[in-house]
Image (spheres, helix red, strand yellow):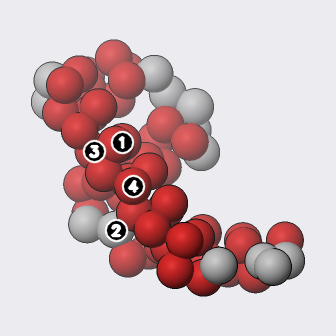
């Protein structure tokens, strides 16, 4: 069973380990609450690219939790 503090540590470690572009998109969306469109404009990429990086980030988070369980 993963405790809340362990989950927070795992989350931070997983985010730090993400590729830089993926981490940037993930943080902009999940921490700064920007929309995909806002992120795309800010970073200078397409919305599809933002979607790709978010899907990649979420997959990395799911894998990290699955490995810990």
Question: How crowded is the residue under tag 4: few (<14 C-alpha within 10 Å), some, or many (20+)?
Answer: few
**Which class describes the residues within 10 Å of circle 1: few (<14), some (14-19), or many (20+)?**
many
Q: Residue at x 39, y 55 (%)?
A: 59
Instruction: Kindly report which numbered mark, 4 or 3, lies closer to the viewer in this rendering.
Output: 4
The residue labelled by disc 3 is 53
Residue where numbered disc 4 is placed: 59
Q: In this view, does 42 lie above or below 64?
A: above
Dot 3: element: helix
Ranked by sequence position, the earlier of labels 4 and 1 is: 1
Q: How far apart are marks 4 and 3 (CA)?
A: 10 Å
Q: Which circle marks residue 46 in the picture?
A: none
Instruction: Say whether marks 4 and 3 touch (CB < 8 Å).
Output: no
Which residue lies at the image location 50% right of the left edge and 60% below the top edge?
A: 62
SS class, disc 2:
loop
The residue under label 1 is 54
The residue where tag 2 is placed is: 18
């Amino acid at each position: 069973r993963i405790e809340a503090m362990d989950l927070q540590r795992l989350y931070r470690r997983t985010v730090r380990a993400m590729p830089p572009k993926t981490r940037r998109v993930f943080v902009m969306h999940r921490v700064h609450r920007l929309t995909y469109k806002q992120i795309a404009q800010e970073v200078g990429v397409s919305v599809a690219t933002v979607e790709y990086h978010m899907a990649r980030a979420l997959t990395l988070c799911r894998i990290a939790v699955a490995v810990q369980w």
